[in-house]
Image (cartoon, rainbow, N blue to C red):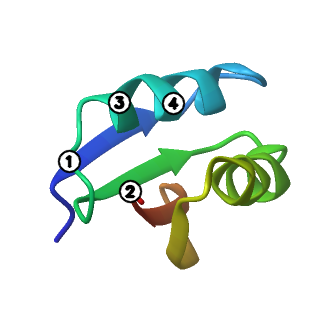
């Protein structure tokens, strides 16, 4: 279970990344953030953003409700 969840379903690029960035700022190092998005661009955008910012992509999977990403703040 993530410390915080961002529901970015229905949002188009670049909003899932912007919402992820805003939510990550509120977390402490080592805490996790789950992002749920429906925009196919998030499949590449979220992992690339996490890598660029130095955060770890702990898990990525698809469900009926969208694409899920679990990130750990560095």
- Disc 3: which residue: 25
Placement of 60 over or under 25, stated as above or below: below
Quarter of the rendering occupied by the N terminus: bottom left
Q: Examine the rendering and report whether any part of residue 8 can be seen.
A: yes
Q: Quadrant of residue 27?
A: top left
Given residues 41 and 45, the one toward you in this image is: 45
Given residues 18 and 27, the one toward you in this image is: 27
For label 4, the SS is helix
- Disc 4: which residue: 21
For label 1, the SS is loop
Name the N-terminal-most of marks 4 and 1: 4
- Disc 2: which residue: 73
Q: Quadrant of residue 54?
A: bottom right
Q: Are marks 1 and 2 in contact (CB under 8 Å)?
A: yes
- Disc 1: which residue: 28
Name the N-terminal-most of marks 2 and 4: 4
Q: Examine the rendering and report whether any part of residue 63 can be seen.
A: no
Depth check, mark 4 against mark 1: the one in front is 1
Residue placed at 33% from the left, 53% from the top? 33
Please state the horizontal and vertical placement of residue 48, each as a whole percent of the image: 79, 54
Please state the horizontal and vertical placement of residue 69, each as a whole percent of the image: 51, 63
């Amino acid at each position: 279970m993530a410390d915080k969840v961002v529901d970015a379903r229905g949002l188009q690029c670049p909003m899932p990344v912007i919402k992820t960035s805003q939510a990550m700022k509120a977390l402490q190092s080592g805490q996790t953030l789950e992002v749920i998005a429906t925009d196919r661009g998030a499949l590449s955008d979220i992992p690339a953003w996490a890598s660029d910012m130095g955060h770890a992509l702990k898990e990525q999977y698809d469900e009926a409700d969208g694409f899920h990403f679990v990130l750990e703040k560095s």
